[in-house]
């Protein structure tokens, strides 16, 4: 089993490579424009990589984005395995990250409290 530091490095590398693929236009799907990879967690057995994404527009696009990523998961896994050398490459699982939307809501609430004062 890999150490927690190695798992963190692998997760960071997967996040970096996926982000670069999106920015450089290596993924030719218009449904994936304007999304960002917020976090990647690789399990201890290196079986799965849990990938958290968000979009500028928010949760309205979540189903569309997650479906596009699922459709492209084979291509993404193959491309990542060519860039990151591992004995076996983890399967990709995509999840919607609601953290940016929650943070925005909290900031708006704080701003409204300051306006009332």
Image: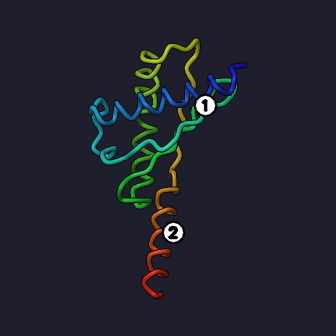
**SS at badge 1:** strand
Number of residues whose C-alpha sits closer than 10 Å to that of mark 1, classed few (under 14), some (14–19) or many (20 or more): many
- On the image, the x and y values in percent for residue 92 come to 53, 32
Residue closer to the observer: 23 or 96: 23
The residue depicted at 57 percent of the width and 37 percent of the height is 50
Image quarter of residue 2: top right
Residue 9 location, x and y as percent?
56, 25
Q: Residue furthest bottom?
A: 116
Counting other residues with Cα less than 10 Å from the Cα at mark 2, is it few (<14), some (14-19), or many (20 or more)? few
* In this view, 83 is above or below 23: above
Q: Which residue is mark 1?
A: 42
In the rendered view, would you say 108 is above or below 40? Answer: below
Q: Tell me, for residue 106, which label it has, or none.
A: 2
Q: Quadrant of residue 23?
A: top left
Residue at mark 2 to residue at mark 1: CA–CA distance: 29 Å
Residue plotted at (47% across, 68% down): 107
């Amino acid at each position: 089993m890999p150490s927690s530091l190695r798992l963190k490095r692998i997760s960071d590398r997967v996040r970096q490579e996926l982000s670069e693929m999106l920015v450089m236009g290596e993924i030719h799907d218009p449904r994936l424009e304007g999304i960002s990879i917020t976090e990647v967690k690789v399990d201890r057995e290196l079986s799965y990589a849990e990938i958290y994404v968000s979009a500028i527009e928010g949760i309205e696009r979540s189903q569309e984005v997650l479906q596009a990523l699922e459709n492209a998961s084979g291509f993404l896994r193959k491309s990542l395995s060519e860039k990151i050398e591992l004995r076996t490459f983890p399967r990709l699982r995509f999840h919607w990250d609601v953290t940016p939307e929650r943070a925005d809501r909290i900031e708006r609430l704080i701003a409204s409290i300051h306006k009332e004062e």
